[in-house]
Amino acid sequence: METIHWFFMLWITMILLFNHNNIGNVEGRYHHHTNNHKRNSPVSSSPVSPSPVPTKPPASDYSPVPSTPSTPYPNDPPPPESAPDGIFDLRSFGAVGDGLADDTAAFRAAWKAACAVESGVVLAPENYSFKVTSSILSGPCKPGLVLQVDGTLMAPDGPDSWPESDSRNQWLVFYRLDQMLLNGTGTIEGNGDKWWDLPCKPHRSADGKTTSGPCGSPAMMRFFMSSNLKVSGLKIQNSPQFHMIFNGCQGVQIDRLSISSPKLSPNTDGIHVENSKAVGIYNTMISNGDDCISIGPGTANVDIDGVTCGPSHGISIGSLGVHNSQACVSNLTVKNTIIKESDNGLRIKTWQGGMGSVTGLRFENIQMENVRNCIIIDQYYCLSKECHNQTSAVHVNDVSYKNIKGTYDVRTPPIHFACSDTVACTNITLSDVELFPYEGELVDDPFCWNAYGTQETWTIPPINCLREGDPETVADPSAFECS
């Protein structure tokens, strides 16, 4: 009897100590969580009509599909018992949070514990920096899971600090999750600067000369085979490679993010989406060394609104059709967006020899500020001098540009439509396009090749090379159908 009494008193003491140590840090966040993240889903409604999630998305030319074991980290210690308030503070799992200690085990344990309860919250509290090595955060989890970063979550400092046993393809992988929210007022830090100078891939240095760049660099965050996701409020910066990748996802809402890396950091795309459906990107600022937003094959129903890009390489659809592959992108809208100090503005890029289609694109209310290639379709995309003309191509059809205004860099024409010799671009519509030189004289010779469409209003600069009607010869429609 005395043994039972002693055990009961010890249990009560542990609960009181736990609550005393944590209530001051999580009480406010707990009330915020319960008010805003309902049981059913952090994404109250999909930004656009959902489509079925592919069961096995094809491999991408951007980055390899992660190999995910059923139990990613079998040697990790079992997590402590569930927190009574549903909030799993990393410090309660042994994390130090000084930016020096390795807090990976605590991070994974907190994730497992929160995953097992409904509306669980993994909390990285403010005023702490948690260093975490490459991790796969795997589901399925209970509905309403939240990863709330109010402090700093940071990757190891460069390749020399990267554990040899860890994957160099990605840092954080979110895998097979549903109804998950990643938010907070803090920072996710990629510590990418030492990766950018690895001697493998050429990139432009500060003096304009070509220098060596990264190979085998990790993407910062990869969301894979997941649905009903929301990411909001965070500062995401200095990725070794792509900042965020969404692959094989359905129902994604991105809102109020700040994504940044230096202008000359190579391959640091802000947000890359492929093989995904129903994606909304809103009220976000992106400055980086590559595409601000890139749309890969297998993507449909994308809504981009209120985004500021720059400096960057603009918003890119593609590249598509590499190695004679089929690539399909449909139903994309970009509106109320600013693109500034960028190498490209609104770009569609495809390889020769590809198949499939790009269709149903709407660009509306776009402000350009000192942008090269403000409007560009390039169906001769090539990364070497060894690319040859081929007869097949990805069909670009039904693309409209409305109320595109601002200034361009006069080193290249502001409008450039270079379409396939054999598969013409069709149904291009221009309306209220007014682009003036940022400095220097007006470039009045926009380029068109095998591009068909309509000018609903006169453009500035004038474009007289867009062909009216339909091409005389049309390829077999079956080549454009997407499976």
Image: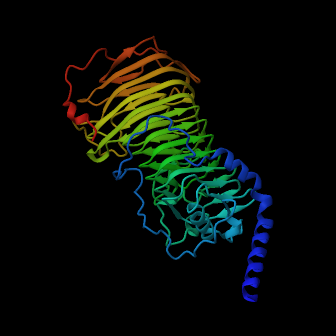
At 50% from the left and 38% from the top, the residue drawn is: 46
In the rendered view, does 197 fall on the left or right side of 321? right
Q: Position of residue 149 (x, y in %)?
A: 66, 54
| Front one among 392 and 442 | 392
Residue drawn at x 67%, y 50% as measured from the top left: 33
| Res. 51 visible in picture | yes
Residue drawn 35% across and 52% down?
A: 55
| Along the viewing direction, whichever of 233 and 212 lies nearer the viewer | 233
Rendered location of residue 95, percent (x, y): 68, 69
Q: Quadrant of the C terminus?
A: top left
Judge from the rendering whether residue 276 lies leftward or rightward of residue 94; answer left or right.
left
As rendered, which of 451 and 282 lies closer to the eye?
282
* Image quarter hosting the N terminus: bottom right
Residue 290, placed above or below residue 168: above
Note whether 83 is above or below 202 in the view shown. Answer: below
How is the model colour-coded?
A: rainbow
Q: Is residue 267 visible?
A: no
Q: Residue furthest bottom?
A: 2
Q: Is residue 447 above or below residue 197?
A: above
**Front residue of 53 and 348:** 53
- Give above or below for 107 relative to 283: below
Instruction: From the top left corner, tell me how far across and down residue 330 is, in percent.
Output: 38, 34
Q: Residue furthest front?
A: 1
293 on left or right of 101 = left
Q: Residue furthest top?
A: 457
Tally of marks? 0
| x and y, in percent, of residue 65 in the image | 40, 57
